[in-house]
Image (cartoon, helix red, strand yellow):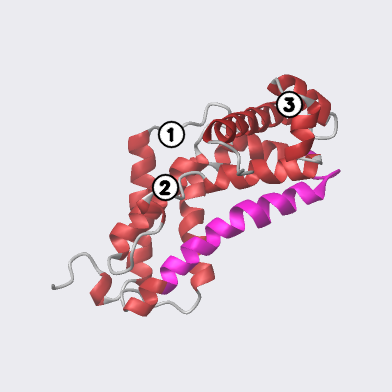
Amino acid sequence: MTTEPSAYHQRVAGQKRAAILAAATRLFLDSGYDRTSLAKIAEAAGVSKATLFKQFPTKAALFDAIVTASWRSGEEDEAAHPAAGDPRAGLTAIGRRYAALLTRPGMADLFRIVIAELHRFPELAETQFNRGKMPYFASVRRYLEAERAAGTVALDDADLAATQFLGMISNYVFWPRMLLAHWAPDQPVTDHVVDEAVLMMLARYATPAGRPDAAS
């Protein structure tokens, strides 16, 4: 007799997990991390405390899961890992995916939780950085290193280049949201910001082989 869960039970477990993550994010934002108990989250998610504790024995583990799920959204898309050889196309794909990720419902809320609780729970910021930002940043760095190996860009510091690229995008489409409730650039504006960031990167780092007008 197999002990593997059936497809039905896997689907139900996935639905419960999603409900728990959504309820936790909402309660953390509304009541604060410290004043939100796992029992309250279970009630809001419509699951038993035993079900919640089985998946997330601590609030820290639950927050870790929220951060990981938020930053990994869309990783299965082909655009998440473009092949080296055409830095304009690759950076455009990465940049637009990054902008879409930062403007997803809930991403700004996640950062607000971290900022609001930073003085009492600095480990939340470490989780956001180590489980969310850094893995994403590392994927961009690896892409730039692959382009360097392909001879399409010339750079000495892939970390700095990745920081520059992501910063040009986030400083316009995301960070103003932390202070300006009405800040919500539309899609054409967001695409333009990404396109300009790509052109800046090409102007600074692209070799003749990596420029859009390079001879074939």
Q: Is residue 98 left or right of residue 154?
A: right
Q: Tag 3: Cα neighbours inside 10 Å, few (<14), some, or many (≥20)?
A: some
Residue 2: x and y, percent?
60, 44
User: Residue 97, which numbered label?
Assistant: 2
Which tag is nearer the camera, tag 2 or tag 1? 2
Please identify the quadrant where the C terminus is shown: bottom left
Q: Tag 2: Cα neighbours inside 10 Å, few (<14), some, or many (≥20)?
A: some
Query: Can residue 36 be seen here?
Result: no
Q: Secondary structure at mark 1?
A: loop
User: Residue 27, which numbered label?
Assistant: 3
- The type of residue carrying mark 3 is Leu
Please identify the quadrant where the N terminus is shown: top right
- Tell me how far mark 1 sits from mark 3, CA to CA: 27 Å
Q: Secondary structure at mark 2?
A: helix
User: Residue 111, which numbered label?
Assistant: none
- The type of residue carrying mark 2 is Arg
Q: Is residue 15 left or right of residue 204?
A: right
Kindly identify the residue that appears in the image at 36 percent across and 35 percent down.
Answer: 187
Kindly identify the residue that appears in the image at 32 percent across and 65 percent down.
Answer: 87
- Front-lying residue, 180 or 40: 40
Q: Secondary structure at mark 3?
A: helix
Residue 97: x and y, percent?
42, 47
Above-or-below relation of 169 to 56: below
Residue 102: x and y, percent?
51, 42
Q: Is residue 139 on the magenta stretch?
A: yes
Query: Residue 137 falls in which quadrant of the image?
Result: bottom right
Q: Is residue 123 on the magenta stretch?
A: yes
Residue range corresponding to the magenta coloring: 117-145
- Front-lying residue, 125 or 63: 63
Specify which label sits upstream in the sequence, 2 or 1.
Answer: 2
